[in-house]
Image (tube, rainbow, N blue to C red):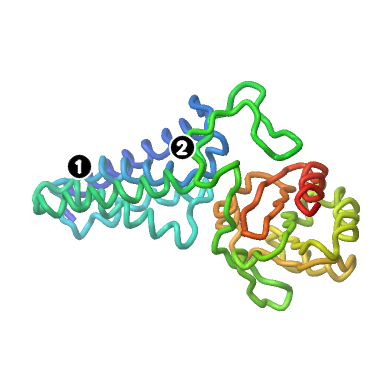
Amino acid sequence: MAKKDLLNILMGIFLSVAILASGFYFFLFANPMHLHQSNLLKWIPVLLCFAALYASGKVNNETPALYLPFLFIPFVIFDLFNFFYFPFIIVLIVTGVLALIISRTEINKNVRLVSSLSVFGIFIYYLLAQPIIIEQEGFGRNMNGELMNATVLWNPLPDGLQRLPNHTLVDKNNYEYNLNSATGSTHFIAFWATWCGPCIEKKPLLDSLKYTFQHKVTFIDISLDEDRDKWLAFLDKHTPAGKQLISNEINKTRRDLNISSLPLHFVVNPDGEYRSFASLEQAGKMLEKQVE
């Protein structure tokens, strides 16, 4: 590698790191737009990925294509914000490759145009795939799980409902269970972990709900434990009712299901659409209302 190419690659890496770091700080920490759950919005890393790779590609416009893969080194930053998981990382890589193609002036104009349209399509898809909600002063949820003091710019489903995704979990015997099969009846999904104090504290109330609605509702407990043995030990000791599942891809589960904190509870209607509640008490009231 020529000295000039090496310097350009290093400059491109530095520029990408600066763009990604400042971008994540802007959207996730400063968050001047008050985006609800900005740390879960996938269009943000797509946008930052394009900006970073396009800028570093421009710096390396004359660098031989053989060395351009080094420009993807800053992708480790995505892991810091839990976006580095399969298959979403493939989306980011494709976006980065397209950004580099667009930045190369020697590439055919039509190819760059198609690449630009492809990036735009990826961005719009993820922009519209999740709710875009602006939090206002006093933001929260009422007893029905409906947002208060919020401006909903876009929601793919009406009335604040969200649809369960195609997402696979496993039980203690490693049999797979796909969440989008939770249809046909009311389901109650509780996300928890053995290390989550509030989750353990609310277990008696959850057990009470399971007993009360055992003939009307299917209960599913989903653990986000990284230590599978601790989860299994808890199940052996307490033998909780309902289907017991665990995530093998915690970051992906958090992203796919918009989980920013635990405990979290989904009240799912027979069509596989759900409302989420941090409060088990509120979730229980919604469950009672739904099965009336």
Lateral position of residue 183 relative to residue 237, left or right = left
Q: Which residue is mark 1?
A: 58
Q: Position of residue 190 (x, y in %)?
A: 74, 55
In the rendered image, the residue lying farthest to the top is 137
For badge 2, the amino acid type reads: Phe
For label 2, the crowd category at 10 Å Cα-Cα, with few meaning under 14, some 14 to 19 and many 20 or more, is many
User: Which disc is residue 201 wearing?
Assistant: none
**Residue shown at the point (36%, 46%) measured from the top left:** 123
Q: On the picture, is 57 further left or further right than 136?
A: left
Q: Are marks 2 and 1 in contact (CB under 8 Å)?
A: no
Residue 101 % position (x, y): 20, 52
Quarter of the picture containing the N terminus is bottom left
Residue 232 pos. (x, y %): 79, 69
Q: What element does badge 1 sit on?
A: helix
Task: State the residue at coordinates (71%, 72%).
Answer: 171
Along the line of sight, which residue is nearer the eye, 192 or 229?
Answer: 192
Q: Is residue 213 above or below residue 205?
A: below
The residue carrying mark 2 is 24
- What residue appears at the point 26 percent right and 48 percent down from the top-left corner? 99
Q: Residue at x 11, y 46 (%)?
A: 105
**Foreground residue among 64 and 207:** 207
Q: Where is 17 relative to 167, above or below?
A: above
Q: Based on the displayed image, in which of its 4 quarters is residue 137 positioned?
A: top right
Label 2 residue SS = helix
Q: Amino acid at mark 1?
A: Lys
Label whose residue precedes the other's in the sequence (2 or 1): 2
224, above or below 142, in the image: below
Residue 225 occupies which quadrant of the picture? bottom right
Provide residue 43's location: percent of width, then percent of height. Answer: 42, 44
Q: Residue furthest front?
A: 292
